[in-house]
Image: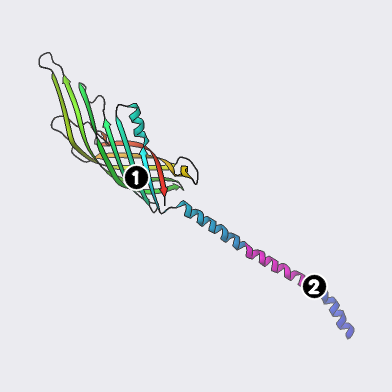
Amino acid sequence: MLKYIISTIILLAPYAGSAQDSLPVKQDTSVVMQDTPVVEQDSLVVEQDSLMVRQSKMAITLYADIGKLGESLFEIQTKREFGISILLANKYQFVGEYGYGSLNPKSIINNGSYSSEGNYYRVGVEYVFTVLPKTSLSTGFMYAHSDFADYGNVQIESELWDDLNETFARPDLKADWIEWIVNTESPIVKVEEGFLSNFYWGVRFRLRILISDISQPDFDIFAIPGFGKTFSTVLPAANLYLKYRIDF
């Protein structure tokens, strides 16, 4: 009987050792599997932090119409326009613009000259669509008003009658219009941080619709600062802006 028990122990010993060797391997595998979710959680935190950097609660943008400045250099007229916009919740943008124009349209009066000058402003609201983290597309409406004066001279020579030489000046003219606008904006230099990262350029397309009566008893109004020539009450236009944006 004793021989039988000893033989049984000798036969079972290899299996017991094999079972003990396999047990630590399972524990190590369990440890490796537990480390994996920690790595995934770390990457999730990084993604959330990056998202918070891209989205700002508020932004203020100051800008100038560099297209009008260019026109002033090559034409006998002066145009200046500046603006400010406030972006809220990355969606709603409130816009205000102020400008000055001294217009001298040619070929308006064949036998004379015409000019108009004055100030104007626009206010409006846009809805912003984020195309890329720093590139946006927006659309909205603006109301505009201009206080201006115009001046003209008409000369008509006649062999039968006395020559006509008439000059007019109307200092207190006003005009109102509305605009449907589409605006694009993107960074000039693609850098994430620093002073240059706040500079943007933008293009604004406008459809201007004159809503006030500008008819005059003697001579027509031919040009309105901020609106343009009055050959039509609906005018398309485009502006090129240089912008500086401050995010909060």
Give the total of numbered labels. Answer: 2
Left or right for 24, reference 78: right
Does the rendering let one see residue 46?
Answer: yes
Left or right placement of residue 220 versus residue 140 in this view: left
Residue 186 at what x, y percent from top left? 43, 42
Query: In the visual, does 167 lie left or right of 106?
Result: left
Is residue 204 within the magenta segment? no
- Residue lying farthest to the bottom in this orientation: 1
Q: Earlier in the sequence, mark 2 or mark 1?
A: 2
From this viewpoint, which residue is outermost toward the right? 3
Where residue 42 appears, as percent x and y from the top left, is: 57, 59
Residue 214 in sight from this viewpoint? no
Q: Which residues are magenta?
A: 20-35
Which residue is the site of mark 2? 17
The circle drawn on residue 84 is: 1
The figure's colour scheme reads: rainbow
Q: Tell me where residue 127 appears, x and y as whole percent.
A: 36, 49
Would you say residue 28 sits in the magenta stretch? yes
